[in-house]
Image: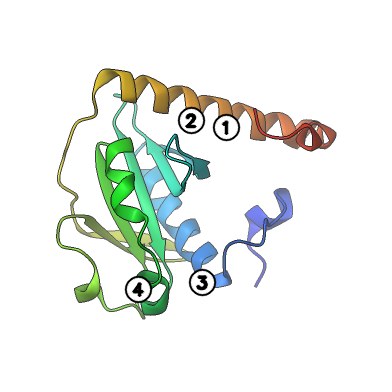
C-alpha cells in the first residue's frame, strides 16, 4: 500500500509500514480536533518525537508511535518526551495490547484510516520558556518542510 503522503514527501526509511499507518490515522484524528501536526520533530534533548501536535491555544502534545510489542520494549527514550509537551500519548495498532502501555500517558488506537483516543493523557503544563522553544522548533520545521515541497533542492542544505 502506498499512502498519499508518500507520493508528496519522500520516506526517510526510519518508519515501518505499520508505524506510517498509525501516524496517518493519528494525524487524521488530531486534524479533526483542530491540531496541526509535524512528524519526526527533533527535540532539544537530541531525540525525535514521532508526532508533535499544536492546538490553537498553544497546547503541545507528543505522540509516540509503537507499532508492536518489540518496538515498545526496545524503547527507553519516551519518558524524556514529557519535558517537551503538555500531554504525552502513545499511538498503537489494534494488534498491540493496550495493557502494556504506561498508565501515566494517554493512549490512541489507530490504523491508516483514523484513530480513537482510548485514554486521555494527564495534563502537565509546560514552563513558558519551554513552550516558546517548542513553538519555534515546530514553526521552523514546518516552514522548512513546506519550502522543500516547492524547492526540493533546498533540502540538501540540511535542517534549519
2 versus 143 height, above or below: below
67 to the left or right of 88: right
Q: Which tag, 1 or 3, sits closer to the chain's start?
A: 3
Q: For the residues marked 1 and 3, what is the alpha-carbon distance in whole angstroms?
A: 24 Å
Q: Residues within 10 Å of mark 4 (few under 14, many from 20)?
A: few
Pointer 4 residue: 73
Mark 4 or mark 2: which comes first in sequence?
A: 4
In the depicted view, which residue is nearer to us: 101 or 110?
A: 101
Asked which quadrant contains residue 130, the reply is top left
User: In this orientation, does residue 103 appear?
Assistant: yes
Q: Which mark is residue 18?
A: 3
N-terminal-most mark, 3 or 2? 3
Is the image coloured rainbow, by chain, by secondary structure, or in one colour?
rainbow
> Which sits earlier in the primary sequence, circle 1 or circle 4?
4
Q: Provide the residue designation for mark 2.
A: 138
Q: Earlier in the sequence, mark 3 or mark 4?
A: 3
Q: Residue 109: horizontal and vertical position, in percent?
A: 32, 66
**Crowdedness of circle 3 by 10 Å Cα count: few (<14), some, many (20+)?**
some
Which residue is situated farthest in the right direction here?
153
Task: List x then y, in percent, for residue 104.
Answer: 15, 56
Tell me how far mark 4 sits from mark 2, CA to CA: 28 Å
User: Is there CB contact under 8 Å for labels 2 and 1?
Assistant: yes
Mark 3 or mark 4, whichever is nearer to me: 4
Secondary element at image label 4: helix
Label 1 SS: helix
Report the residue at 18% width, 52% height from top: 120
Amino acid at each position: 500500500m502506498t499512502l498519499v503522503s508518500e507520493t508528496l514527501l519522500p520516506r526517510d526509511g526510519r518508519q515501518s509500514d505499520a508505524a506510517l499507518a498509525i501516524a496517518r490515522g493519528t494525524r487524521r484524528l488530531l486534524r479533526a480536533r483542530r491540531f496541526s501536526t509535524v512528524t519526526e520533530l527533533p527535540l532539544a534533548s537530541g531525540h525525535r518525537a514521532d508526532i508533535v501536535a499544536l492546538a490553537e491555544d498553544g497546547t503541545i502534545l507528543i505522540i509516540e508511535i509503537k507499532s508492536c510489542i518489540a518496538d515498545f520494549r526496545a524503547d527507553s527514550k519516551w519518558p524524556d518526551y514529557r519535558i517537551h509537551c503538555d500531554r504525552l500519548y502513545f499511538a498503537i495498532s489494534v494488534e498491540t495490547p493496550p495493557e502494556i502501555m504506561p498508565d501515566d500517558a494517554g493512549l490512541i488506537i489507530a490504523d491508516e484510516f483514523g484513530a480513537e483516543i482510548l485514554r486521555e493523557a494527564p495534563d502537565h503544563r509546560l514552563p513558558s520558556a519551554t513552550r516558546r522553544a517548542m513553538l519555534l522548533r515546530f514553526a521552523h520545521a514546518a516552514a522548512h518542510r513546506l519550502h522543500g515541497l516547492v524547492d526540493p533542492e533546498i533540502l540538501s542544505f540540511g535542517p534549519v
